[in-house]
Image: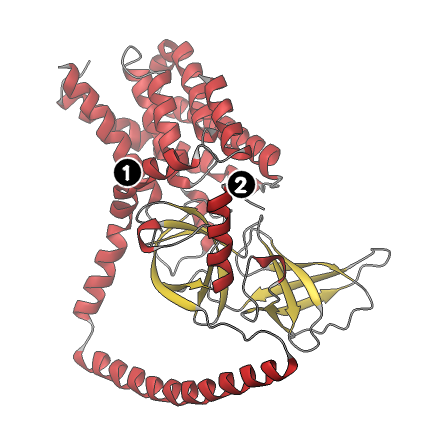
Amino acid sequence: MSLVTNLTIFFTILLAMILELIPFPEGLPKEIGFLRPELVLMTLIYWVVALPHRAGVVLAWISGLTMDTLVGNFLGQFACSFVIISYFVLQFYQRLRMFSVWQQAILVSGLIILHRGLSFLFLYVFDGTIPSLWQMMPAISSALVWPLVFLLLRAIRRSLKIT
Amino acid sequence: MILLSLLLLLADRFSNFIERPKIYVSSGLYFIHYSANLPNIAFQRTSTFFSSHKYLSDRILDLESRLLFLGTDLEKMASLIEENNRLRELLGSAAKSQDSVLVSEVIGIDPDPASQNILIDKGEADGVLKKQTVIDSSGLVGQVTEVSKQYSRVMLITDFNSYVPVAVLRNNLRLMLKGTGVSEKLQLLHVNPTADIKVGDSLISSGLGERFPAGYPVGSIEAIDYVEGRPFLDVTATPKSGLDRSQHLLLVFSERATIASEKEKSTSESSGAGD
């Protein structure tokens, strides 16, 4: 049972990583890239809310490090903010379960703003990059996609009877 | 855990002992990049499959004629290079070495549009070195910032952290070109208000700083703006190479880069990773 759970968590996060890295078709304007939702973080948040005894800070740290190597950040940048966010979610998961999907979506967008803010902070401290406000766009797009992610992952979880 | 990630962050930024393990980890994660690029490959395959026979044969004819033209140009070039080297010998300066290149294909683009990085399908196994110059058919593209076994990451010249020493082709005025983080836009730093510079001037890499080899076209000047009271001109330039569009890139193996990297390996100096 626990093997199925772990494998499901592993593969959904892997799929989210692949989806997050797929390049957009060439014809589209480049600004559309700012609308890319933070799928990995959302999948992570879902699993932490649904299975707080299985998915937690360690999972967040590992997937953060993986994302760092994939995207080419300094190692630990995403890992740090993923850990902080999953810690928050672990504190409030019971309250989060009571929320409706759209209320959750608003909270998720707040968490993604936090994640982007932390990334900016690191980039500013280590690189001196000055970010633009455009980069906060994933917060909105992620909130719009959250119901989809939530329902899909819940359907997967229920069909595999993972608790 | 947060402390651990902060420690990793510092280690990665200020030293390079984490580099070897990072290469192995990122090589292991290659399959994620590969599968993320699959839809793109599938799209290309299907579009070739469905394009008409006439279109393809026209294209072959077109390419053949271009090859012919380029071949004649190349013959002329060979004699010119020969002559140039003879003249340089007469002047007593060293002959310019010919750079060899390696063709590579773009396999991934950074999902974050604000960072101008791409992935190419050649890595350490093909002899790619860190800090190596990348060009395409029309000009300078960027430099390799991270090498793993099968692929490497290229920082484009439009990246916020990219600096290229350039010279104006017309009068050899030396300047520093900086990326802005916006594609198709570059910025020239510290241009004197009295400098002889015009809109439309071509910029080539000057070879100073021993990072980029000299003589590759980099961009052309798009706009010059002087704000009263500022010490320098605001000059923007557009890159020559099709940074967002080119699918095939060339990795330049200049003699100098190879020697420098060997020197670095032998002394194993711990210099900073970026600029």
In this rendering, the answer to whether B72 lies above or below B180 is: below
- On the question of residue A41 being in view, the answer is no
Q: Which residue is mark 2?
A: B269
Tell me where residue A51 appears, x and y as whole percent: 27, 14
In this rendering, the answer to whether B80 lies above or below A93 is: below
Disc 1: CA contacts within 10 A as few (<14), some (14-19) or many (>=20):
few
Label 2 SS? loop
Q: Nearer the viewer, residue B39 or A153?
A: B39
Label 1 SS? helix
Tell me where residue A31 appears, x and y as whole percent: 48, 51
Do callouts 2 and 1 mark residues in contact (Cβ within 8 Å)? no
B47 vs A84, left or right, is left
Of label 2 and label 1, which has the lower sequence position? 1
Q: Which residue is mark 1?
A: B28
For residue A5, which quarter of the picture? top left
Amino acid type at mark 1: Gly
